Image: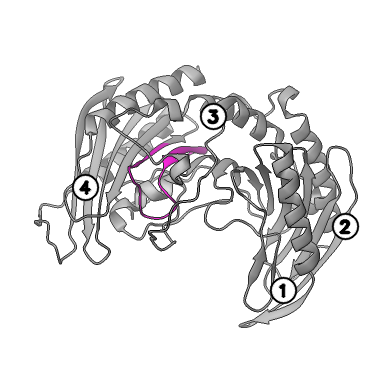
Amino acid sequence: MDVRGRGLIGSIAAAVVVAGVLATAPMTSAAPRPIAPPPASADLVAATNAMLSFDLSAALSAGTGNDASFQTGFTNPPGGQDPLSVCRYSNSDKGVDVPDTMAVGYMAMNGFVWQSVYQYPSAEAASRAWARLSTAVGAHCSGSWSRSDYAWKVSRKRLPATGAAGAGWAVTTTSNANVQHTAVVPVGDAIQVTSYVRQSPTLGSRVPAAINALSGRLADRWAQRETAPDSQGPLVTGAETSMLMTSDVPAQLPVTAPEDGGWSSFTADAPGNGPWTCALRANLPAGSWTFSSSLGGTGDVTAEPGALVQAMNVYQTPDAASAAWIKLRRAVLGCNDPSRPPISPTKPISRTASGVSAFQLDGVAAVWSRDFSTDPGSGFSMKSYTIHVLSGNAIQSVTYYLTRDEIADLPLDQLAVNTLAEQLMMRWNDAQG
């Protein structure tokens, strides 16, 4: 459920990537599909605290080429634009995917191991989704097929009920370049998917049993999440309870609502990814963690009425954050295009500006950037505004962006973004103590 990449329009790429929204889907005029609203912060804390963490058995963590990165959080819709399938089948690359209608998509990733929990509005909704999924796995997740230079083999077997997990499926997929073993089980009002995914021509012999056993343990932890002690630590918990949430959105900065197909997400990444700025090619230092929270948008370049993103890059020490800030400030203030081409009904334009803000913390002034672009071929315009601020060992970036199906300048209340950024920074500092 990791979602990263660049947008189709360079001027909003930074905002899109921080939001965790890949702009790879074509724009469409079809009516949006309602999406589950973001979970309450207490529910998010309980979920990620119970999910996959840093402890893995040797069978799942050993081996050269292990990806040491860790991620946890949620994305609605579950999996974003490209959720991890239980299996792919046939040379047309069809997939068996977990039904995601109105489900909250919690996820965690440690190296090659992924856990996704699709939580439904009720146990009855989960039961209906499981019946569809189980039937599809039984019908399709078996056999061999080829496409291009790859030959695939898929097999499945039943998993018995154990603890909090109902009877499920274990599905193994191998090819000459990639392997995946997935255990998928029903757990109360949710469906849990635990997978080992790796670019390798062979699957370790101990991996299937290790994933199946891990699936059972994680299902038990999920079922007991409301009473589990806090084991993920104050940094992650503090981020989940203090970062951008629906109640923070001011009237001046409307975002796409879930009932209109509005996406939402929270991700915590270790190690950090480093700040994203208007200077897309700037190689800025990454910290120990990157946290991001986003509301709005519809999963592609469109964001009507708008989208908000808060990102926190946390460093080991204030000195490390200050060193990163010096480079970020230089990069952002370099985002100034002296030309201001007029809006044209036929030619695309792009305008970029940046500057030093009156908003400051501990004597350090924030910096901002603004992008505006048009695409007459697609008939839409985009504007984004980002403000970055340093505080202690963290750099915060808050972005608001919007698009409209017209070729025209777009109003964007920069003062409202600045005010929100100050409120969020203060709350972050209070939560982190």
Mark 1 or 3, nearer chain start: 1
* Disc 3 to disc 4: CB gap under 8 Å: no
- Which-is-in-front pick, marks 3 and 4? 3
Q: Nearer the viewer, residue 27 or 124?
A: 124
Q: Give the range drawn in magenta.
A: 286-310
Residue 238 image point, x, y percent: 54, 24
Mark 2 residue element: strand
Q: Does the segment drawn in magenta span residue 207?
A: no
* Residue at the image point whose x is 78% and y is 60% from the top: 135
What whole-number distance in Å separates the C-alpha atoms at marks 2 and 1?
Answer: 22 Å
Residue bearing the label numbered 3: 240
Residue 78 image point, x, y percent: 59, 48
Query: Within 10 Å of the Cα at label 4, are there few (<14), some (14-19), or many (20+) other Cα atoms?
Result: some
Q: What's the residue type where badge 2 is placed?
A: Arg
Mark 2 or 1, nearer chain start: 2
Residue bearing the label numbered 2: 158
What whole-number distance in Å separates the C-alpha atoms at marks 1 and 3?
Answer: 38 Å
* Disc 4 to disc 1: CB gap under 8 Å: no
Q: Against 111, is 88 above or below?
A: below
Residue bearing the label numbered 1: 175
Mark 4 or 2, nearer chain start: 2
